[in-house]
């Protein structure tokens, strides 16, 4: 059985006065939930001891290249008043394919108790999320108070449409139909390291290949939403940029780490160009070392930059240039076609080197040396530059100037769909090597 504990949120319909804040507790985080006879109770489709509302968000593709859907159940304060002060309220959600007899084992259950009376204009909200494959489903909801045995039952339909003109139609072939997951407040929340299912991204090349994945975790500089408008540099704005960028880059690392390369290997490097620091490195022969990566990313405080990093900002471009230069293959002893693709002939000595550089737009300090990386004479390699714009206002990028002599294949990404098309193009290129 696959069971995940979800996040429980209290939403406020109106601003609270100066009264003491409400205290909610997720019971299922430290004690086992009750055994709900789901298959029996779900047949009571008209039972509504506890008034509540059910909402299913529109399924959407995430940066992880998985389709996610959110389920929300709101319980008004007046419904909680019916339970008295000692309730233990649980919500269980299960799905089944439309027309199927049995509910899937993968499900979610969360429980809570509230220690103070809620203002009547407020409500308690349960939020659960799952990854789903395209198809038509029935979704069952059971809201149950363990103390009073009151319960409400809900049944809804969910249709998850396949992606239009999907460039990677087989990428989900090994995934379960439904996986619930916990969305917490950890920095790696978008990468969902607890999920062990893997995408199907085979990269079978005719010649040995070595992939260098370099991911820049430095968030872009704040810019104005409109010309003439002041730039928002509040701590909150900086944190939002940082968290959005962090989530995108983690998701990209997770997807690329799932590539199966029988005739090669991938080396992953997480770096922070702003602080001129290599944060994390790993040969992704197996699962990523998520604890070590998480620990490395904890030093990325958007509100605190070391003085030496600030004083040496003009060296940021040189840091990246020297890093790339150090990873370049050695110059060929015999003349060959250097640059993006080589001459296609197999190498008996060195595997074909592929660089995937991923970053949000970078604007280097005025006066910085933006000299390009020089390709070794006669060396064979290929470079891909994935520019992920976390906001449409981030349009300026100096990174192409540093990469220009490497003749990179460049992808401008703003959505998970853009990333999916880039993966398809990149994988097709590699398979042709």
Image (spheres, rainbow, N blue to C red):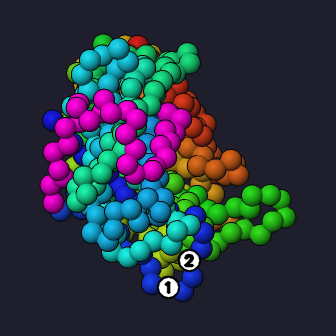
Residue 205's disc is none
**Residue 358 in view in this figure:** no
Circle number at residue 16: 2
Image quadrant for the N terminus? top left
Measuring 59% from the left and 54% from the top, which residue is drawn there?
362
Q: Is residue 86 visible?
A: yes
Q: Indicate the secondary structure of the residue bearing disc 2.
A: loop
Q: Position of residue 221 (x, y in %)?
A: 61, 62
> What residue is shown at x 24% (from left), y 52% (from top)?
149
Quarter holding residue 38: top left
Secondary element under disc 1, as helix, strand or loop, is loop
Q: Which residue is mark 1?
A: 19
> What is the tally of numbered marks visible in this picture?
2
- Cβ–Cβ under 8 Å for marks 1 and 2: yes
Cα–Cα gap, marks 1 and 2: 7 Å
Q: Main secondary structure of the magenta part?
A: loop
- Left or right: where 238 falls relative to 288: right
**Quarter holding residue 107:** top left
Query: Residue at 72% across / 68% down in the picture?
Result: 231
Q: Position of residue 75 (x, y in %)?
A: 45, 55
Task: Give the extent of the magenta segment.
Answer: 31-59
Expressed as whole percent of the image width and height from the top left, the position of residue 185 reads 38, 61
Is residue 34 a member of the stretch shown in magenta?
A: yes
Residue 387 in the magenta stretch? The answer is: no
Q: Position of residue 377 (x, y in %)?
A: 45, 33
Image: 3 above or below 14: above
Q: Quadrant of the C terminus?
A: top left
Q: Is residue 110 above or below residue 171?
A: below
Which class describes the residues within 10 Å of circle 1: few (<14), some (14-19), or many (20+)?
A: few
Residue lying at 49% horizontally and 38% vertically, measured from the top left? 56
């Amino acid at each position: 059985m696959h069971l995940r504990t979800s996040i429980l949120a209290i939403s406020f319909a109106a601003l609270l006065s100066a009264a003491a804040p409400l205290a909610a507790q997720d019971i299922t985080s430290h004690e086992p939930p009750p055994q709900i006879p789901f298959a029996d109770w779900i047949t009571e489709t008209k039972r509504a001891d506890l008034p509540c509302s059910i909402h299913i968000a529109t399924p959407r593709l995430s940066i992880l290249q998985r389709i996610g859907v959110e389920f929300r159940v709101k319980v008004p304060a007046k419904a909680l008043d019916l339970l008295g002060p000692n309730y233990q309220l649980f919500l269980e959600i299960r799905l089944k394919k439309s027309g199927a007899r049995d509910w899937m084992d993968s499900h979610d259950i969360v429980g809570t108790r509230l220690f103070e009376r809620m203002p009547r204009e407020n409500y308690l909200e349960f939020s659960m999320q799952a990854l789903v494959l395209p198809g038509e489903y029935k979704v069952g909801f059971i809201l149950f108070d363990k103390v009073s045995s009151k319960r409400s039952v809900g049944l809804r339909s969910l249709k998850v449409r396949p992606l239009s003109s999907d460039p990677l139609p087989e990428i989900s072939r090994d995934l379960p139909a439904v996986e619930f997951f916990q969305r917490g407040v950890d920095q790696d929340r978008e990468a969902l390291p607890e999920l062990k299912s893997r995408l199907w991204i085979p990269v079978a090349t005719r010649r040995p290949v070595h992939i260098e994945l370099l991911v820049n975790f430095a968030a872009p500089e704040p810019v104005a939403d409109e010309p003439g408008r002041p730039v928002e540099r509040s701590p909150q704005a900086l944190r939002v940029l940082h968290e959005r960028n962090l989530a995108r880059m983690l998701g990209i690392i997770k997807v690329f780490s799932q590539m199966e390369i029988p005739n090669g290997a991938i080396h992953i490097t997480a770096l922070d160009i702003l602080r001129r620091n290599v944060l994390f490195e790993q040969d992704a022969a197996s699962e990523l070392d998520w604890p070590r990566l998480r620990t490395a990313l904890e030093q990325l405080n958007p509100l605190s930059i070391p003085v030496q990093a600030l004083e040496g900002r003009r060296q940021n471009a040189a840091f990246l240039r020297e890093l790339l230069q150090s990873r370049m293959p050695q110059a060929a002893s015999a003349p060959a076609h250097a640059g993006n693709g080589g001459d296609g002939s197999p190498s008996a000595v060195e595997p074909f080197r592929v660089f995937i550089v991923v970053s949000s737009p970078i604007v280097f300090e005025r006066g910085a040396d933006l000299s390009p990386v020089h390709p070794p004479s006669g060396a064979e390699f290929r470079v891909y530059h994935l520019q992920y714009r976390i906001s449409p206002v981030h349009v300026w990028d100096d990174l192409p100037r540093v990469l220009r002599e490497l003749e990179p294949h460049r992808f401008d990404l703003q959505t998970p769909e853009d990333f999916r098309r880039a993966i398809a193009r990149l994988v097709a290129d590699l398979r042709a090597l």
